[in-house]
């Protein structure tokens, strides 16, 4: 039973116990989603969510005193931010603190895919080096990388690629005035001109299957796709067909459409590197993300406003 003397924070699932739950419990009652009832709903002032369950209009409608939804992660496609805005509910995410970590992982995945690092590792472990040298493979040299999405993480990726002396272009909804790189208003046009696509755009309806069969065909038989965004951004069935038919050369994937369920058809392919959505998965960065969830809720409840409100959220209030 929730103590009505203290406001409650609804947890849609585990967030980060050693950081988020531990700190929030000092000031608030923590209410698991399965304990939500008519008797407890009125005490809920905040939701802390890690994207494991949807925070939709139906859930918000059950919470008459809800004021803020704090999302663990930059992507917040499991939160209906538009519905929250209509209700005057603040939505926050955790930008910036994970930019460098995700950019690091992206370059690692890019190199692992192009230089076939997992395949070479298996070659040694299976004893095949005793039978002969590992075959020559593709290179990052003489390639142009097209970044799909030039937000904070996209810019961090571009900075790293500059150190690799690799030309970079980008596609996003609009041209960035502070980015001195070739810009393509059309993703299809950019795919025709580059040999690597790095996808780092938000998920959601607006970007669903943005990378489709046409884009993959435009990327071509020497093309490489790296997806560190959301699985829904890439048409998974089209990608599988492109990898099988060698319409593109290879892919490196950190995300999938129905995580943690990965199509088994990927497992038998030797031209794809698969990671279990680990872009920000370090103790350091996840702790910083969790702390930002706590700080957003605490700051708002203290009357100081949210620290990192998302674009749709009604803040600052008119």
Image: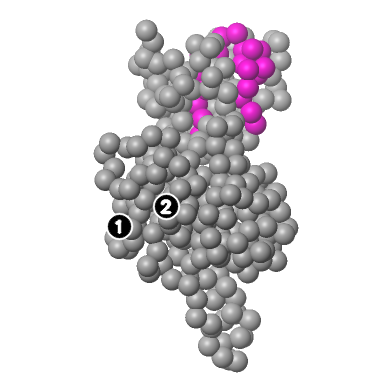
Image location (x, y in percent) of residue 134: 53, 83
Q: Residue at x 60, y 8 (%)?
A: 64
Looking at marks 2 and 1 on the same chain, the residue that comes earlier in the sequence is marked by 2
Q: Which residue lies under the disc numbered 1? A: 162
Q: Residue at x 37, y 7 (%)?
A: 318
Element marked by disc 1: helix
**Magenta span has 44?**
no
Front-most of residues 159 and 125: 159
Rendered view: 19 above or below 79: below
Image location (x, y in percent) of residue 209: 60, 42
Q: Residue at x 56, y 54 (%)?
A: 216
Query: Is 243 displayed left or right of 195 in the figure?
Result: right
Give the magenta part as a residue range.
Answer: 53-73
Q: Residue at x 63, y 69 (%)?
A: 270
The Cα atoms of the two marked residues, 2 and 1, are separated by 13 Å
Image location (x, y in percent) of residue 254: 55, 52
Front-most of residues 317 and 174: 174
Query: Is 51 displayed left or right of 228 in the figure?
Result: right
Image location (x, y in percent) of residue 171: 42, 43
**Magenta span has 66?**
yes
Instruction: Point out the frontmost of discs 2 and 1.
Output: 2
Q: Which residue in the rendered view is the most extreme toward the bottom?
A: 131
In the picture, the disc for residue 146 is: 2
Element marked by disc 2: strand
Q: Is residue 278 visible?
A: no
Q: Residues within 10 Å of mark 1 (few under 14, many from 20)?
A: few
């Amino acid at each position: 039973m929730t103590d009505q003397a203290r406001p409650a924070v609804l947890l849609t699932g585990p967030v980060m116990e050693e950081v988020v739950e531990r700190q929030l419990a000092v000031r608030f009652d923590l209410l698991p989603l399965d304990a939500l009832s008519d008797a407890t709903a009125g005490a809920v002032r905040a939701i802390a969510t890690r994207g494991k369950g949807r925070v939709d209009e139906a859930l918000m409608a059950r919470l008459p005193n809800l004021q803020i939804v704090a999302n663990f992660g930059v992507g917040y496609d499991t939160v209906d931010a538009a519905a929250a805005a209509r209700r005057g509910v603040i939505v926050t995410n955790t930008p910036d603190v994970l930019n460098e970590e995700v950019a690091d992982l992206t370059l690692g995945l890019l190199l692992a895919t192009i230089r076939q690092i997992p395949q070479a590792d298996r070659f040694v472990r299976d004893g095949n080096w005793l039978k002969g040298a590992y075959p020559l493979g593709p290179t990052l040299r003489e390639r142009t990388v097209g970044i799909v999405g030039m937000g904070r993480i996209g810019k961090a990726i571009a900075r790293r690629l500059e150190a690799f002396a690799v030309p970079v272009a980008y596609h996003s909804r609009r041209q960035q005035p502070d980015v001195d790189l070739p810009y393509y208003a059309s993703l299809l046009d950019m795919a025709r001109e580059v040999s690597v696509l790095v996808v780092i755009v938000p998920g959601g309806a607006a970007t669903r299957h943005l990378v489709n069969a046409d884009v993959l065909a435009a990327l071509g038989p020497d093309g490489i796709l790296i997806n560190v965004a959301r699985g829904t951004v890439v048409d998974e069935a089209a990608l599988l067909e492109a990898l099988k038919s060698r319409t593109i050369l290879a892919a490196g994937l950190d995300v999938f459409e129905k995580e943690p369920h990965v199509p088994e058809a990927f497992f038998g392919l030797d031209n794809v590197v698969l990671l279990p959505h680990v872009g920000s998965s370090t103790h350091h960065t996840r702790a910083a993300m969790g702390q930002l969830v706590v700080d957003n809720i605490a700051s708002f409840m203290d009357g100081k406003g949210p620290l990192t409100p998302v674009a749709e959220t009604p803040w600052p209030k008119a």
